[in-house]
Image (spheres, grey):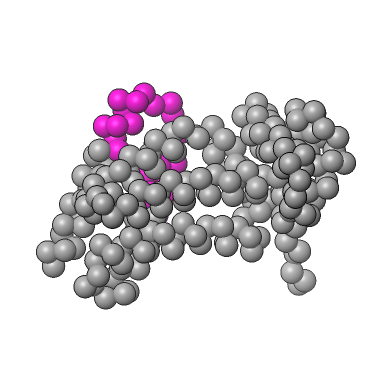
């Protein structure tokens, strides 16, 4: 059986002038608004164009299809989260436990703040899930976590450090997405994140004592 071709999700070209950059930004902002209002099932390039106040042809100059737009929205979310977590984890002026706690709180807060769009993107994920660009975008976050684990547990074998990194990422992914499915107050978010941070800190303390 022939392989099913993967959808093209790379941008046709990168904006080089301020006007082009503004157009792409307007398209992405409109895409988020359409996702919030219509969800992934009713998401179309035409609706994005209407919301952005541009022609469909203008969008196609930069995005070959709706999968490319959705992937860019998702990739921008990953980029923001990676930059935020990188700033926390790489701040070596603070002790490791303080960075770990700050990371947990920031991640849970972000998951709750972006829950509406994230849930819509989860429905759209099959459109770009298997594309090479998706793996590349997610790999940066994985590298960030691995670097933090390597610093935290330098005396542990590499296989164990990789297991710890994978465990933390999977826990974050599962817990964050499930917890943010319902609206949460700031007090609830803080209490939940603190409990999760306690769990991770206890886990690291146990690893360090072995």
Helix, strand or loop for the magenta stretch, by majority? helix
Vertical placement of 143 versus 31: above or below? below
Residue 74: say if magenta: no
Q: Position of residue 175 (x, y in %)?
A: 38, 44
Q: In the drawing, does residue 154 fall left or right of residue 64?
A: left
Residue 143, quarter of the rendered image: bottom left
Quarter of the picture holding the N terminus: bottom right
Q: Position of residue 206 (x, y in %)?
A: 15, 59
Q: Look at 84% across and 41% down and name the residue there.
A: 58
Q: Look at 41% across and 52% down and name the residue there.
A: 86
Q: In the drawing, does residue 40 fall left or right of residue 137?
A: right
Quarter of the picture holding the C terminus: bottom left
Q: Position of residue 85 (x, y in %)?
A: 40, 49
Q: Look at 46% across and 32% down and name the residue there.
A: 113
Vertical placement of 18 versus 13: above or below? above
Vertical placement of 158 versus 9: above or below? below
Q: Is residue 39 visible to the viewer in this orientation of the structure?
A: no
- Magenta-highlighted residues: 170-193
Q: Position of residue 60 (x, y in %)?
A: 83, 46
Q: Is residue 151 visible to the viewer in this orientation of the structure?
A: yes
């Amino acid at each position: 059986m022939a392989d099913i071709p993967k959808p093209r999700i790379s941008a046709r070209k990168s904006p080089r002038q301020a006007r082009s950059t503004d157009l792409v930004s307007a398209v992405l902002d409109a895409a988020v608004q359409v996702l919030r209002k219509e969800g992934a099932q009713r998401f179309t390039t035409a609706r994005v164009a209407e919301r952005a106040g541009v022609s469909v042809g203008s969008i196609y100059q930069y995005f070959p299809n709706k999968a490319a737009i959705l992937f860019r929205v998702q990739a921008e979310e990953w980029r923001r989260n990676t930059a935020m977590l990188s700033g926390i984890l790489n701040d070596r002026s603070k002790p490791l436990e303080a960075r770990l706690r700050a990371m947990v709180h920031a991640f849970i807060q972000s998951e709750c703040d972006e829950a509406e769009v994230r849930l819509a993107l989860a429905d759209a994920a099959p459109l770009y899930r298997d594309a090479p660009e998706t793996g590349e975008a997610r790999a940066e976050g994985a590298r960030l976590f691995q670097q933090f684990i390597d610093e935290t547990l330098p005396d542990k074998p590499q296989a164990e450090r990789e297991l710890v990194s994978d465990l933390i990422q999977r826990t974050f992914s599962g817990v964050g997405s499930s917890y943010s499915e319902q609206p949460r107050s700031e007090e609830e978010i803080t209490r939940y994140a603190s409990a999760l941070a306690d769990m991770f800190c206890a886990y690291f303390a146990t690893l360090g004592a072995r």
